[in-house]
Image (spheres, helix red, strand yellow):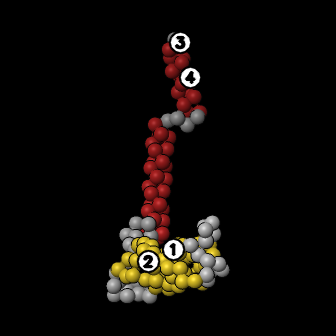
């Protein structure tokens, strides 16, 4: 008799706390539905944010600089950007302690050339020892 009593007690506890085959099936359906909803929202966010699109390919590379005088430096760089794409580049001049002593944002107009050699003269607050590209971005 003890076996039947423990089985009845287990069945009573399962019924009391909602652990029936139907409840397990309902829980599984809820979990699958939430997971599908999460995947759908995450995918929509990726598409909306543009993360699934191919990134625009561009590159800016310093090729040199010329110190003109105590208050200006010319920075030369190579810019590789898709044809007919506008961009901007931030160019900076540094002193011997690597402090920024000159800064200029340069508009790079669209062109039918992908690869271009560019240069820009920057006014400085003191004599520069270096000039370089800080960052470029598409506009």
Circle 4: element type: helix
Total marks drawn? 4
Residue 128, located in which quarter of the rendered image? bottom right
Circle 3: element type: helix
Of the residues tagged 1 and 3, which is closer to the observer?
Answer: 1
Residue identifier under label 2: 77
Q: Give the Cα distance between marks 1 and 3.
A: 86 Å
The crowd level at tag 4 (other Cα within 10 Å; few <14, some 14-19, many 20+) is few
The residue nearer to you, when weighing 61 against 135, is 61
The residue nearer to you, when weighing 78 against 10, is 78
Residue identifier under label 3: 2
Residue identifier under label 4: 9
Q: Give the Cα distance between marks 2 and 4.
A: 81 Å
Residue identifier under label 1: 132
Q: Could you tell me if the residues under marks 1 and 3 are in contact, i.e. CB atoms within 8 Å?
A: no
Q: Give the Cα distance between marks 3 and 2.
A: 88 Å
Above or below — where is 110 with respect to 19?
A: below
């Amino acid at each position: 008799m003890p076996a039947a009593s423990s089985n009845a007690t287990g069945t009573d506890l399962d019924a009391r706390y909602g652990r029936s085959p139907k409840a397990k099936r309902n829980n599984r359906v809820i979990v699958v539905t939430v997971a599908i909803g999460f995947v759908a929202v995450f995918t929509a966010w990726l598409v909306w944010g543009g993360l699934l699109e191919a990134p625009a390919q561009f590159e800016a590379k310093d090729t040199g600089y010329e110190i003109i005088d105590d208050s200006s430096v010319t920075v030369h760089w190579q810019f590789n950007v898709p044809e007919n794409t506008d961009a901007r580049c931030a160019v900076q001049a540094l002193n011997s302690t690597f402090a920024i002593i000159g800064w200029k944002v340069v508009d790079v107009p669209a062109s039918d050339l992908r690869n271009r050699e560019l240069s820009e003269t920057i006014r400085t607050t003191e004599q520069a020892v270096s000039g370089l590209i800080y960052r470029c971005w598409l506009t």
